[in-house]
Image: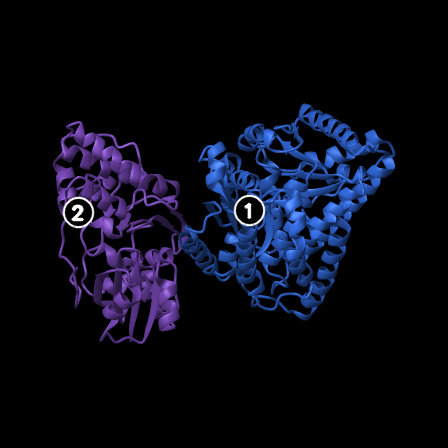
Amino acid sequence: MSDYRGMWTKLGLDLESHDALLSVLGGAYGDIYLAQKDRPEGMKYFDFVMSEVHGLRIKELMDAKAQGRKVIGSYCVFVPEELILAVEGVSVGLCAGAEFNFAGAEEVLPRNTCALIKSAFGFKLGRVCPYLEASDVVVGENTCDGKKKSYEILKPMVKDLYVMDLPQMKSEMGRALLKEEYRRFIGKLEEVSGRKVTAASMKKGIEIVNAKRQAVKRLAALRAADPAPISGLDALLVNQVFFYDDPVRFTESTNKLCDELEERVKKGKGVFPAGTTQLIVSGCPMAVPNWKLPMLIEGGNAVIVGEESCVGERGARRITETMGDTVDELLEAITERYFQIDCAIFTPNPTRVAYVQEMAKNLHAQGIVHYSLQFCQPYIVESGPVEKALEAEGLPTLRLETDYSQEDAGQLKTRIEAFVERLQKK
Amino acid sequence: MRYAGIDIGSRTVKLAVLEDGRLVLARKAVTSYNPLATARELMDGVEFTGVMATGYGRHLIKGHLDCPVISEITAFARGAGFFSHRCRSILDIGGQDTKAIALDEQGEMAKFEMNDKCAAGTGRFLEVMATALGYTLEEFSAAALTAGKAVNINSMCTVFAESEVISLTTQGVPRAEVALGIHKAIVSRSLGLLKRIAPPGEVFFAGGVALNYCVRSLLAKEMGRPVFVPPDPQIVGAVGAALCATGRQRAADAAGATRAGGVLPFSMDAGGKTTESRCWAPAASKTF
């Protein structure tokens, strides 16, 4: 670790706070991840990535920067990685999942701001996120009101904040807005990178990201097996690393993991006994190291077989069709792909419920846990109708609202256990 | 065969023992800083074939007694069936939680709601408010029942509500009116949970707060339905756990066995009046 201290200092990190953060993260990882039984061998790669998440991976980013490549950080699955790759850029996810320096965040944000936003500010103000500090451009996006307005406050704190507008309705005008915003984003990327986006570079970008998505889709499908060949915690980790890692290496490692899981499924080998209650988690994203809910669920006689979330199927299940040979045609294809994302900022948002039902059917899930972050209006408001619709289709649903703190673990555990007891009676 | 259920709640520990479907022993004690010792004390000298733990401290006990555990939501759903086979809506207001549970036609848990992580609208909230007004819990409920009108308590956060209460009393508002306002606030909060899921019919009211006559009558009035309170509303979870320990015996069967045993609890009509019947007395009880 000490090898990286020079790099961290150069990035402007607060070494003392950063050490404290890494020590907590390392401890939590040991307790939650390494303590699991019968983990696939293929998870060793992801353990390594996590152990070097602020080390080797940051060094790679610094090396890329030294070669003239730009690091583009973002907070949302609406920011197209394909376009970033088309200018030889490196895309990194910046969402944070730890209750770190909330006191600092609350000096600039209202207290009733969701934990995801507060965490991003806590990391920025505490100077502990090397990804954020290494980013040449930070891309914000107009999703929820909380994020939209927070970017105004973030702007003076970062080198180059670029805000992307997003539609809120799935209309022709909404689609046109998204396409023009992506066109504007290409302009920004060309400007900062000094590289031109061409049909060939776009195609290459699309292929790399599609391969990455295909790999996590393959993983998602394997989780239908009973007994489950991989824990929900481990699968979530793969989906989290999706946002940080080198995309080509990530794809290879995930496919290798899937080869092993296929063997497990053939042999009927699992990480939980056959017949364990299978659940889907649907709702807000879970950024590293927000593992509280899956840990409670999998410690409570159930296994998570899918995430209908930005960190999961909502973010990754769609593939960009590489149709067309011009920049505009490819831009159209990318727009088509992203416009289908069923985020709760859209009104109405019917395809989300339909997809949860489809997931439940394909993955043989017995129930849905709807997870909202406290103060996340879009998902909390949507949770009522989603629950109603799912229950009406015979899918028992448990609505939970929580944040990044640990103090409600007991109450959550009670609810989760009661929900699993309800399902086991069926 | 005797089966025990132990419910380690945030404020009290409850022990119930069933023998051939009849409740033969019920004990309670304050949880204290050492719930395990309290539980052991309660179980001292009590004989049983099997035991099941529930409540907040269930996992603590599980580690020490090597017994199975069940969530208190399932325990209350099961326990309610022991005392009444009619109710499909259950409201449990305990020390730090409020739970609303809906049962299906077969008496199995169909759905539940629980308060968020703060203590708003729970037994603990009532305790803090009673203290702020200088009442014991018994006086608090009695005073609220005498009030001609209620002041509106806006804050449901225990900390803020306490300041609000102090502010009201310094303005010269009679404390009985503040007391009634607090009781109304609790009921309105609980109804928010209950109405989301409650099937029609009588409401089964359990947990320590069900001992409060003012909350009982307001609940019946606001809900516009009869409210059934078992003789000892605090023991329901422990009985539910004991039933689960007994095996997969249906709550409905257990209720039948109880009725055969001649136990008739009291219930309450929609007007909030208690319709008293023969009160049930456990074979051995310990009050606190």
**Residue A107 image point, x, y percent:** 47, 34
Label 1 SS: loop
Q: Residue at the location (53% across, 62% down)?
A: A31
SS of the residue under disc 2: helix
> Which of the colour schemes (rainbow, by chain, secondary structure, one colour) is used?
by chain
Residue sitting nearer the eye, A67 or B44: A67
Is A193 on the left-hand or right-hand side of A38?
A: right
| Residue B32 visible in the picture | yes
Judging by colour alone, the chain drawn in blue in this rendered image is: A
Q: Residue at x 38, y 52 (%)?
A: B105
Q: Residues within 10 Å of mark 1 (few under 14, many from 20)?
A: many
Q: Which mark is residue B137?
A: 2
Dot 1 and dot 2 residues touching (CB under 8 Å) = no
Query: What percent of the width, then of the height, locates residue A184?
Result: 74, 26
Q: CA distance from mark 1 to mark 2?
A: 42 Å
1 or 2: mark nearer the eye: 1
Q: Quadrant of the N terminus of chain A?
A: bottom right
Tell me the number on the disc at residue B111: none
**Residue B75 shown left or right of residue A386 in the figure:** left
Is B245 drawn above or below residue A123 in the view shown?
Answer: below
Q: Nearer the viewer, residue B273 or B161?
A: B161
Q: Tell me: B149 left or right of A162.
A: left
Question: What amino acid is at disc 2?
Answer: Leu
Q: Which chain did the image draw in purple?
A: B
Q: Give the number of the disc on residue A97.
A: 1
